[in-house]
Amino acid sequence: MKDLVKKLTSIYGPAGNEELVSQAIREEIEPYVDEVKVDVMGNLIAIKKGNGNGKRIMLAAHMDQIGLMVTHIDDKGFIRFTNLGGISVPNSINRRVMFKDGLAGVIGYETEVDSWKEITLSKMYIDIGASSKEETEELVKIGDVAIYHPHFSESNGKYISGAMDDRAGCALLVQTIKNISSTPNDLYFVFTVQEELGLRGARTSAYALEPDLGIAVDVTATGDTPKCRPMAVSLGKGPAIKIKDASVLAHPLVKELMISTAQKHGIPYQLEILEYGGTDSGAIHLSRGGVPSGVLSIPCRYVHSDSETIDASDMENGVKLLTKILEENINI
Amino acid sequence: MSDLLKRLTEARGVSGNEDQVRQLILEEVTPLVDEVRVDNMGSIIAFKKGVKSDKKVMLCAHMDEVGFIITRIDDNGMLKFAPVGSIDPRILPSKRVKIGDKAIPGVLGIKAIHLQEPSERETAAKAKQMYIDIGAKNREEAERLVKPGDYAVFDSECVYFGDSKVKSKALDDRVGCAVLIESLKGSYPFDLYACFTVQEEVGLRGAKVAAYSIQPDIALVVEGTTCSDVPGVEPHRYSTRMGEGPAISIADLTSYSNKKLVSLLIECAEKADIPFQIKESVSGGNDAGEIQRARGGTMTAVVSVPCRYIHSPSSVADLNDINNTLRLVQEFLKGCEAL
Amino acid sequence: MDAKKFLGQLIEVPGVSGYEDQVSKLIMDTFEPYCDEVYRDDFFNVYGKKLGNKSGKGPKIMLAAHLDEIGLMVKDIDDRGFITFTNIGGVDQRILLSQEVYIHGKERLFGVIGAKPPHLQERNEARKAVPMKEMVIDVGLPAERVKELVTIGDLITFKSPLVELTGSNVCGKSIDDRAGVVMMYETMKELDKLVFSGEIYFVATAQEEVGTRGAIISTYKINPDIGIAIDVTHGDTPDASRDDTHAMDKGPAIGVGPNMHPKLTKKLMDVAKEYGIDYQVEVAPGLTGTDARSMQISREGVPTVLIELPLRYMHTTVETLNLDNVKKAARLVAQFIASMEEGWEECLTY
C-alpha cells in the first residue's frame, strides 16, 4: 500500500490535467476489472461485473489535485498565476512547485507589503529562474498549471505528501479493486476529474452510469492537532464514515450500511461531521432522480498543503471496510 | 455587422425578461435556418440540418443582459429597485433607464453635490439607497405606468467612435449573438444548433436546460468578456487586451475548456492568420460551465470578444476583435467535422 | 382534519433535512384520503398524486412545499457529558441560548442549550453574540449514560409547540415550510369541489434548507409541464425594511423575477383577481431561496410560479403565520389548476 500511495501521490495531475494519473491507475487496475474506459470529461471508469443479482454501485475517488495556473508572464520572466481549487496564501509562500514536464519553480510574493494579511494570490508569483520573458515563454505558456512539488515521506506510520487529496482515495480504490474476490454487485469505480473545481467529473459520470448507490472516497480534515477547529476525527482511529459536509447529508441507509459492516467485521471507524467543504457524493446523490450516497473518508491533516498527512492503518482499514461492503449483498 | 450589432445592443433583454431581444433575433435567424424554437425558459434554439453527418455542434451566446427590477413604489412616486445580475453600484448615479414593456424613461438621481456632506462624496453609493425617478408626482401616478416586477434596462445608444470602437450597453453578450447570427449564413456538414440563451447573468440557467435538450457533441460559447487593460491596473491583471483579437479561454470559474477544442481554435487562428489571445485570468464564468456538465458531459470551449467597462451602459469593444471572432468561429466550424 | 390541527401535528414531528422519515410518514397518512396515490422516494420526498375529474389532456402539474426543517446535530460529547453541536440549514446562533431541545438518540432526550453565564464574561464579551461552537447542550445525565444514548450525528430539534396568538395568527417552530405542506393539503380539499383535468402531484420536498436538494430530485422524477413552488417569505416587523417584507393580512405573495415564468405568473394573478383573492407581489431579482429555483431548470426547463406565505421571525422557534393566508393561497392554487382548460399550453409560451 505504501508503494501505491507513494506512486500515485508523485504523479502530476492538477484539476483539468489528470491524464498522467489516469494512465497510471489504468495500468494498475486493468488486469483486475472487466472493462476500463475514459469518458468525454476524462473520468476513468473501471467496471467489475457482479452476478446479475446485486446493485449498481458507483465508487468515486478524484484524480485531480489543486494547482496554480499561469495567467501572465512579465517582462522579467516572472510568472503570475491563479488558483485551480483551494490554493491558499499561507500554504503557498516560498513553496516549491512543479510543472508537467518536471520544471521546478518557487512561489514568491511582493515583499513591499506591510503585513502578511495583505498578501493575496495576485501579489504572488512563480520564479522559475528565468531572466527574461522570452526565456520563460520557451518553457511555460499561459494556461499551464503547476502543482506543489511532490515529495513523499514516511514518519511514525504516517504518510506525507502533497496530493493525498485525493490520491489516497484513488489508492484505496485501486487496492480495493485488487482485493475483491467476488461480488454480487456491478461495481463502477470512477476516478473522477475536476472535483476541486466543483465536483464536475462526478456529476457527468453519475448521470451516465445511473447507479443505485454511490460512495465517494476522499480525505477529510481532523481535529487532533493543537488548538485546531474542533472536530471529532483523529488520525489512526480508522476510516471515517461521513455524516455530513456542505455538499451532502449522507443517506441514512448508506451510513448505516457502512457502520454495520464495520461493526460486523470488527473494523475500527469514526463518524465524521465536516462543517465546510464537499466531495463527489455531493454531485452523485443529486443525479437524475437521486442516488442514495455516502462517503468513506480518510482522515488527513494539513489538507490542501504540500504536506498532507494520513495514517497507514486508516488506509488499511479503509480498504478492508470498503471491500467488505462491496462483496456483500446490499439491501437498500 | 455594425447595423446588426446596433439593433441587438439597443434591444431590451434583462435576464428573465428577454422578450424584445428574443423577437429581434427570431426575425433575424428564421430565414437562415431549417427550424427554430423557443424552449421552456425562453431561449432560442435555431437548427440548421447538416448536409453530411449527424454530429451535433452547438454554438451558444446569451441574449440576456444585466439590468434592474422594480421592487416597490414609494408614496412620493419614486421607484425602488434591485439589480438583476452583477452591477457595480458605483456606476449607477446619474444614469438613464427604460422601464417595462412600454420603455418608460426614468433617471437614477442622486442628491446634488451642494447638498452632500464632504464625507458623503467619498463614500460609494449603495443600490439600496437609490431610486428611479420617472417624474411621477405621487404613488398613484407612478402606478399607472409602472408596477413592481417590471424590469428596467440602461438607456444607452450604440455609438461607433474612435478607431473602430463601439460603445453600447449589453455588448456582453450581444456581440456573441451577432457572431452566431452571421455564422448561420454558412452551411455546414454537421447539425448546427445556434442557441441564444436566457438568464446567463443570473446563473447560466438557460444554457443548462438548452444543453440538456440538445445533447451536443461539441459546444462553442461565444462571449463578451472582461478587458481590464486600462490605466491603474497592473498588466498581469488585464485578463484580455483590446484589439488583440478573440480571447480563447483555457479555464474559468465554471469550466475547463476541452484541450482538443482549444488546440483546434489555436490551429485555426494560426492557419487563417487571425490574431488571437489566450485569456489571462480564470475569473468569471459563462454558459460553458453548464453545457460541459449537461447529462454525461460535453466537449466545450469559449472564445470571447474583449469588452471594457462590462456590465455598464457604456461598455466598449473593438470592431476588429468582433470581426476576427466571427472569422475564428467560422474556421473552427470548418475544422469541427474532422474531430 | 382542519389546517390548524394538521400544522400543530406537523411541527411536533422531527424532520431535520436529510432525516425526514417521520414527518414524511405523517404527511403520507394525512394526504391519503384526498389523493389517488401517495408514495415517497429514497430521499423522503412525499408524492400525493391526484387525477383530474374531467376528461381531456390537462397538464401535469407539480406543487412543491418542503417538509424538512432546520435543526442541530451532535458534533461531539465531552468527558462530562456536555454535547457540542453544529447546525443543519441556516440557524441564527443568537436564538440558541436557553432553548429547550430534544436530542434524537437511542431514545429521545430532553435538554437545554447553555453557555458561560453572564457574570463570568469579560466586559467586551457581553456585546458579542455567543458563537455556536461555544455552546453546549446539557441533558442532565452522567457522561457514561450520555455516551450510551447519544452518538455523533444524532439530530437535535427544538421544543416549541404551536401557540395561538390573536387573530388567525399562530406561532411555533418549522412553520417554514410545514405551513406550505398544510396549504397543499387545503388545496386538495378545494380541488375536490372543482372540475379540473390533468395529473396533479403534491410533493412535500426534502432537504430544501440545505440547497433545494429534494426538489432537484423530485422534479426530475416527475418531469412536470408546470411547477408551483410554495414557501414562506418575510412578514413585516418593525426592525426590517418594507423593501424586504410583506403585510401579514394582505394575502399570499406571488413571486416575480427571472426564476418565474412571466405568462404563467400573470395567469396566476388574473385568477386571483377573478376570484377576489388578495395577493401581494414578491420581487426576486436573482435566485429565489425556494424550490422554484431548481424546478425551473430541471431537465428541459419547467415553467414555474412561486407562491409565498408571509412569516415573521423566520428560522426561529417563534415563527409566526397568519392561517388566513394559507386558506387564501389554497383557494388561489386550486382555481389556478382548474383554470387550465384546453389550450393551456399557450400560457407556457413566450
Image (cartoon, grey):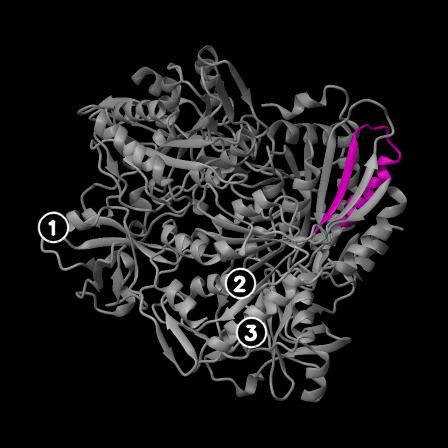
Dot 1 or dot 3: first in sequence order is: 1
| Residue at which label 3 appears | A317
Residue C163 lies left or right of residue B91; in this view the side is right
Q: Nearer the viewer, residue A299 or C58?
A: A299
Query: Does B35 appear above or below A201?
Result: above
Instruction: Tell me where residue C295 appears, x and y as whole percent.
Output: 63, 40
Query: Depth-wise, is mark 2 or mark 1 nearer the camera?
Result: 2
Picture quarter containing residue C191? top right
Query: Depth-wise, is mark 1 or mark 3 nearer the camera?
Result: 3
Instruction: Tell me where residue A245 appears, x and y as whole percent.
Output: 55, 63
Query: Does A1 appear above or below C143?
Result: above
Q: Nearer the viewer, residue B191 or B69?
A: B191
Outermost residue toward the top in this view: B31
Dot 2 or dot 1: first in sequence order is: 1
| Residue at which label 2 appears | A178
Dot 3 or dot 2: first in sequence order is: 2
Q: Nearer the viewer, residue A196 or C126?
A: A196
Span of residues in magenta: C181-205
Residue B134 appearing in the image: yes
The reply to whether dot 3 and dot 2 touch (C-beta < 8 Å) is: no
| Residue at which label 1 appears | A135
Q: Are marks 2 and 1 on the same chain?
A: yes
Outermost residue toward the left in this view: A131
Which element is circle 3 on? helix
Residue depicted at 67% across the width and 88% down the height: C143
